[in-house]
Amino acid sequence: MKKRILYGIANYSELLEKNGYFVDKTHWLAELELVNNPVFLRPRRFGKSLLCSILNHYYDINTADRFKELFGHTWIGQYPTGQQNSCFILHLNFSVIEPGKTIGAIERSFKVHCNHRIKSMRNTYALLNKIPEMNIDAPVSDNLDALLTYLQEQQLPPLYIIIDEYDNFANQLVTANKDQLYRELTADNGFFKTFFKTLKQGRETQSIANVFITGVLPITMDDMASGFNVATFLTLDPFFENMLGFTQAETDELVDAVFQDQELDPTTRSEVGTVMKNQYNGYHLVTNDGESLYNSTLVLYFLNWLQNHKTIPKHLTDLNLKTDISWVRRLTASNPAMTEDFVNQLTLHNSIAFDDTFLVEKFNMYQFFEPSFFPISFFYLGMLTRKDDFYLCLPNMNMRTIFVQYFNEIHNIDVSTRYAEIMQGFVNKPDLEQLFAGYWREYVSQLPEAIFQQVNENFYRTTFYELCSRFLSRWFVWHVERSYPQGRSDLEFVGKYNEKYAGLRWVVEFKYFSNAEFRKLKTDIEEFQVRSEDTEQINGYAEGLRQEYPNATISKFVIYCFGNQGFRVFQTG
């Protein structure tokens, strides 16, 4: 059976049974084994659940007879740690716990999940079939303590406990402003902290071999500190930065395998790689000078479409990954002015200051809604990444597009009903000046007056790109800030290799003059002429592009935007 990209599957054995592609990161299991009670936080859909499943299969006593089948092809299969298949596994996923209206309702949901998982171990493991019957209505900590006591008394192997999305239901309480419920949840005598105290006790008695915890935000772990103060936080440890997400080498190896196995046209390989890098790369989660990472789920989303349809996806944003703007509003304290300022700052400037002392392994609920913590919260959600030691930024075009969509929604800008004739005209006869004129007439005219005090070339470029991508993605892809020896181009139109404009490449440079700057030029928009230094700049980009794609039809354009007064488009070659 031919290998396949299996998008959305986080069960390791299922991935192998269905012959799915697998990026081997199992060498990290050996490193994790040296860490006591590791806590590793990463954004949503970044590969955490698959890592949990791999740990499950590696340490589970019940998979000993399948070890070669499961791991023979992997690094850890060639270099096992000696601890493989040595534990009973209690694998919990707190995303299924409902954040109810009362603390009693939350605890009932917690019991349903955890107690049923503990009870199922009696049937899963032959060595546990004589364990006394448990009361599924009893506190989870009581049932877990009884299990740990039984393991000790019978001198049985220890538990390996995996908790995926430890913070999921607690985060929902925080972002819904249910402060009282959250305080009850994390109270010293509450069921949740008591559960973590039981984990700590089990580690002390060695009836628990280790506890591996994943999640997104560090709020709950801080408020639970006294209950589980034996955790080792790896989230911001530079050594573990690449444990999840894909490196460039891992992505290249995966894409090459898909091209070979699916018999895709090798001449399109470079273009596919460029689009993926522009859209999904750019995450610096610990240091800003190390290698940037790809969001692994988005890579698989893209390659799943590529293998099935032999072309680049029309829609490059996975809707399963997009954080709804309601979350943005909640995380900015449900304050409309704060939400608007935050979204405006990133849409206009793609940069926001942060205090590095706040980017810590954990922080409490009361800090969460402070304006100084907004960038930190969005960093943990994967919407921002490190730009340098002083600023965070949007990591890639995928996230920039999402923020432009937030911007349009906040400012009630119509991006759907005004543009069909403009876009159809462009598809029939590509004319950049006419296309930009339509954007200026229909989109820019809707902008609030106050925005024009802040706009810059980044804003015009990004909003123009986002609008074009809504209507023209069947025929084109776009590159933003593509690197050449002479620098980075602002925007490139690229005809899709399987559509009628294959081979077309437009390099577009944006230049912006504020109203005040333009007045100093003492000229009219109609009389303004392209500047020689801008022509020289774009010629350098085009030369780099021509060396890479000698058969492409390359055109060069400079677009000048003059405050809110108007624009000029020049084709320079």
Image (cartoon, rainbow, N blue to C red):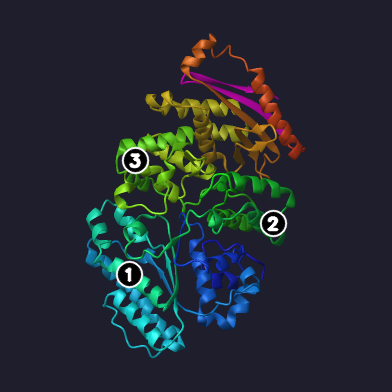
Question: Residue at the location (46% across, 88% down)?
Answer: 126
Q: Mark 3, residues whose alpha carbon is within 10 Å: few (<14), some, or many (≥20)?
A: some
On the question of residue 572 being in view, the answer is no
- Marks 3, 2: nearer the viewer: 3
Q: Which kind of residue does numbered mark 3 sit on?
A: Pro
Kind of residue at disc 1: Lys
Q: Residues within 10 Å of mark 1 (few under 14, many from 20)?
A: many
Label 1: which secondary element? helix
Task: Name which of mark 3 and mark 1 comes first in the sequence.
Answer: 1
In three-dimensional space, the C-alpha distance between marks 3 and 2, rounded to whole angstroms, equals 44 Å
Identify the residue under disc 2: 256
Q: Residue 371: which numbered mark, if any? A: 3
User: For the view shown, which residue lies furthest in the bottom direction?
Assistant: 130
Does dot 2 land on a helix, a strand or a loop? helix
Label 2 packing within 10 angstroms: few (<14), some (14-19), many (20+): some
Q: Which of marks 2 and 1 is nearer the N terminus?
A: 1
* Residue 197 - label: 1
Instruction: Name the main secondary structure of what is drawn in magenta.
Output: strand
Mark 3 near mark 1, Cβ–Cβ under 8 Å? no
Give the total number of marks visible in the rendering.
3
Asked if residue 342 is positioned above or below residue 17 in the image, the reply reads above
Residue toward you, 256 or 419? 256
For the record, the magenta segment spans: 553-573
Q: Distance between the residues labelled 2 and 1?
A: 48 Å
Tell whether 329 sits left or right of 350.
Answer: left
Which residue is at 25% across, 58% downward?
A: 183
